[in-house]
Image (tube, rainbow, N blue to C red):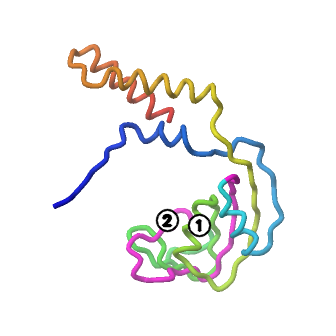
Amino acid sequence: HDVEMYDAASMYPAVMATELYPMTKWYWRRISDMRTLDKMCQRDDVAVVMTLILTNLRLRDVQTWNPYIAASKIEGIHDNDLDLDNGKVIAARGDAIITCTEIDYRWIRKQYVFDAYAIVNVMEARKERLPEWFLTELYKWYKNKTALKGLEDAENKRRYMDSKKLINAEA
């Protein structure tokens, strides 16, 4: 069996060091059509938070093995109007209100269809790299953690676990 495996040493700090995050003031946007919202949510340099009303929401393919929307994220629908699979929405009859990010939105558009929609509100911020002062600290925490890894004495094991908790909590 030709199986390869790669284990990332610390995914949290790696993602924090390489991805973009909302770093500017949030601005309200007036958007009334799904096409404009689709374009906005495909941009890598913009973070978006929105509230939508989706009427008669349902999976595109009922065979989807892992529906994206958790029932806890839906407002405006009574439990008896929800079809669920392990707490995830398969269908919602009526007007489902959901507040989500651009990442959530892309998954929703990929997995679900609906009869009608209303865009209640949209906010946007520019994405940028995290500030250098933060990344410098992050690199320091990572270096401290990796230097302690594998050391066998009790004090270094404790310091390693403390460093690991710190980098995972902050990252």
Q: Quadrant of residue 52?
A: bottom right
Residue drawn where x is 46% and y is 83% of the image: 61
Give the number of the mark in front: 1 or 2.
1
Helix, strand or loop at label 1? It is helix
Q: Position of residue 143 (x, y in %)?
A: 42, 23
Question: Which residue is label 2 attached to?
Answer: 70
Amino acid type for the residue under numbered disc 1: Arg
Upstream in sequence: badge 1 or badge 2: 2
**Vertical relation: 153 (above or below) 71:** above
Residue drawn where x is 56% and y is 70% of the image: 108
Residue drawn where x is 74% and y is 49% of the image: 125
Bounds of the magenta segment? 45-73
Question: Which residue is label 1 attached to?
Answer: 106
Q: How many marks?
A: 2
- The residue lying toward the viewer, choosing from 145 and 84, is 145
- The residue lying toward the viewer, choosing from 132 and 56, is 132
Can you tell which mark lies on residue 40? none
- Any magenta on residue 147? no
**Vertical relation: 94 (above or below) 49:** below
Quadrant position of the N terminus in the picture: bottom left
